[in-house]
Image: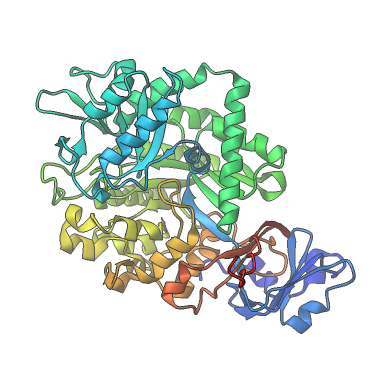
């Protein structure tokens, strides 16, 4: 494996006294478990000992009990499954918390249900205040909205029911938004408004905007809302942001996520996260990609780099760009037109020159480069940029540059991931979530050749990581793990099963490979003495339980730095008297 280093082999020596330079007495031991370590030197064990925030030893029950004394906390796992804590490989931390503070539209089966949900919110929202929601997806509705333009609703009924409130509803993908007439008036959007480069305003036959804004055009509405938010008192804005951090942390810990790779935050958000780290309010360990303009990167990147800040809870050493949109709203940049929208090949949301300049700035400052690319054209262009940069700025050390999503690839480009050592930062659950519309967008041939081509990428020698893209999907790693190993989209229906991961490939994609993708494989991702004691205990053994048991698996304990930060509530005993 590419990340077996001298340091990694040192950890595998299993010598906790030498490694930690302290008494081998443990603060916490967990015994009687089915332990998968992700360490090739000792892949399975029964127990683990923790000292401080580090792993002290891993081994048999008999071996580990030797590290206990009267002060040691001893947990009998009673056969439950223990593994390294899940590492969320690509999601949006503040966005996850914020999504829990707005309308959740993901469960709506029709556009009418969403309109009713917003109308109810309007009854309890002061006039003039924004109503915000997220999670709608037109391809997953039971019926087409009426009226519609290309399958997308118009704003008429929503605007009629919300005359006193601006409304902004973000698509599940985050790459499209819906606004009512009030919000469009505030933004000055009308028949004459020109969409920005890389964006689109959907219109009816009279050229009137219908409320749907694709990709960069979302900024027309979002900027107005941002200006309104900026008028609030600083203390109020800070309180809301800290609440979002708290909610995101709690949600991750409930789901067994101990580390989180944040896929794009501004310098202002990084300052907020630093403040939270100083106050010990980050519940999970964050690896942050800076997402800002090239001018801002040039001016601020050198001062922002952090590795292991706040007791290893905050690292900032990557930059993030997007070169296209998402497949669901026809924004992914394709080499050939969409099957269901023949006049379009999607949207290129940033110029090649701009992304190339970002890569140069990153190299100058020792930062990793992570570029969002979903369509096959987008992925090819990013691979071309990376190849050019690697030739122009050679390095003896792999740069570990990443393509975020890498969902739809031309067969000719799959091998290039392995050849260039480019990491495919993917999200298993996107495959099964999107499968209902992927063949409609791409056709069967393109879908079979390059849609979520996990096994083909692994065979190329590429590292493939996993995640959820929360709040696009639920941050639950078990759903993404299930999708990765089954690709099942319905009863007896599997989406191109030849690309399924094995159980161990999927576990590695959520642990050690994710750690490698953030330069952290010597600190986390496997259960080895000396590494951070970030662990999760589950009710089922993910290496061997039946497929249908994966989604029924429960998180029993989440442990970060040797501390139990989430514990499943004990079940109430059944009342057999019938009362």
Q: Position of residue 112 (x, y in %)?
A: 26, 38
Residue 335's place in the image compared with 365, above or below, is below
Please identify the quadrant where the C terminus is shown: bottom right
Is 434 displayed left or right of 263 in the figure?
left
Name the residue at 23% across, 50% down.
Answer: 142
Q: Position of residue 483 (x, y in %)?
A: 39, 65
Name the residue at 44% across, 61% down.
Answer: 479
Q: Position of residue 111 (x, y in %)?
A: 26, 40
Residue 284's place in the image compared with 579, above or below, is above
Of 259 and 403, nearer the camera is: 259
Of 311 and 359, nearer the camera is: 311
Residue 258 in view here: no
Residue 451's place in the image compared with 338, above or below, is below
Is 74 displayed left or right of 369 in the figure?
right
Name the residue at 42% across, 67% down.
Answer: 482
Name the residue at 25% across, 48% down.
Answer: 141
Residue 340 in view here: yes
Of 113 and 200, nearer the camera is: 113
- Residue 175, quarter of the rendered image: top left
- Residue 486, quarter of the rendered image: bottom left
């Amino acid at each position: 494996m590419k990340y077996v280093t001298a340091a990694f082999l040192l950890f595998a020596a299993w010598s906790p006294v030498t490694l930690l330079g302290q008494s081998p007495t443990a603060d916490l031991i967990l015994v009687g478990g089915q332990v998968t370590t992700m360490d090739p030197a000792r892949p399975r064990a029964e127990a683990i000992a923790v000292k401080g925030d580090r792993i002290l030893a891993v081994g048999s029950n008999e071996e580990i009990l030797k590290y206990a004394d009267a002060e040691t906390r001893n947990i009998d796992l009673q056969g439950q499954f223990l593994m390294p804590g899940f590492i969320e490989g690509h999601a949006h931390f503040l966005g996850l918390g914020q999504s829990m503070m707005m309308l959740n539209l993901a469960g709506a089966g029709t556009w009418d249900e969403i309109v009713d949900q917003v109308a109810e919110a309007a009854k309890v929202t002061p006039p003039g205040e924004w109503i915000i929601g997220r999670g709608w997806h037109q391809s997953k509705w039971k019926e087409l909205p009426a009226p519609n333009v290309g399958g997308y609703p118009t704003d008429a009924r929503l605007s009629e029911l919300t005359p006193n409130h601006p409304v902004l509803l973000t698509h599940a993908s985050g790459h499209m938004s819906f606004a009512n007439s009030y919000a469009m008036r505030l933004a000055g959007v009308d028949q004459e408004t020109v969409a920005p480069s890389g964006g689109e305003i959907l219109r009816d036959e009279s050229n009137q905007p219908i409320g749907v804004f694709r990709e960069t055009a979302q900024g027309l509405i979002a900027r107005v809302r941002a200006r309104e938010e900026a008028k609030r008192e600083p203390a109020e804005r800070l309180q809301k942001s800290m609440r979002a951090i708290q909610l995101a942390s709690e949600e991750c810990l409930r789901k067994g996520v101990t580390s989180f790779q944040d896929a794009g935050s501004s310098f202002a958000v990084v300052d907020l996260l630093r403040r939270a780290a100083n106050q010990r309010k980050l519940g999970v360990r964050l690896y942050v990609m800076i997402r800002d303009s090239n001018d801002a990167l040039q001016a601020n990147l050198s001062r922002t780099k952090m590795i292991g800040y706040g007791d290893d809870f905050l690292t900032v050493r990557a930059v993030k760009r997007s070169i296209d949109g998402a497949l669901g709203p026809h924004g992914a940049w394709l080499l050939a037109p969409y099957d269901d929208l023949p006049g379009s090949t999607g949207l290129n949301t940033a110029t090649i020159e701009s992304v190339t300049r970002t890569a140069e700035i990153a190299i100058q400052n020792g930062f990793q480069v992570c570029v969002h690319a979903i369509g096959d054209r987008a992925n090819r262009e990013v691979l071309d940029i990376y190849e050019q940069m690697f030739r122009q700025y050679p390095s003896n050390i792999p740069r570990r540059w990443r393509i975020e999503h890498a969902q739809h690839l031309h067969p000719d480009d799959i091998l290039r991931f392995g050849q260039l050592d480019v990491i495919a930062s993917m999200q298993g659950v996107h495959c099964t979530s999107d499968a209902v519309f992927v063949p409609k967008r791409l056709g069967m041939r393109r879908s079979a050749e390059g849609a979520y081509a996990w096994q083909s990428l692994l065979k190329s020698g590429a590292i493939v990581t996993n995640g959820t893209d929360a709040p696009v999907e639920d941050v639950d790693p078990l759903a993404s793990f299930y999708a990765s190993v089954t690709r099942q989209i319905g009863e007896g229906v599997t989406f191109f099963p030849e690309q399924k991961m094995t159980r161990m490939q999927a576990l590695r994609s959520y642990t050690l490979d994710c750690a490698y993708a953030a330069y952290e494989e010597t600190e986390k991702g496997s259960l080895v003495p000396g590494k951070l004691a970030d662990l999760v205990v589950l009710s089922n053994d993910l290496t061997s339980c039946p497929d249908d048991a994966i989604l029924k698996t429960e998180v029993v304990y989440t442990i970060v730095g040797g501390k139990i930060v989430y514990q499943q509530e004990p079940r109430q005993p059944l009342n057999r008297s019938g009362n």
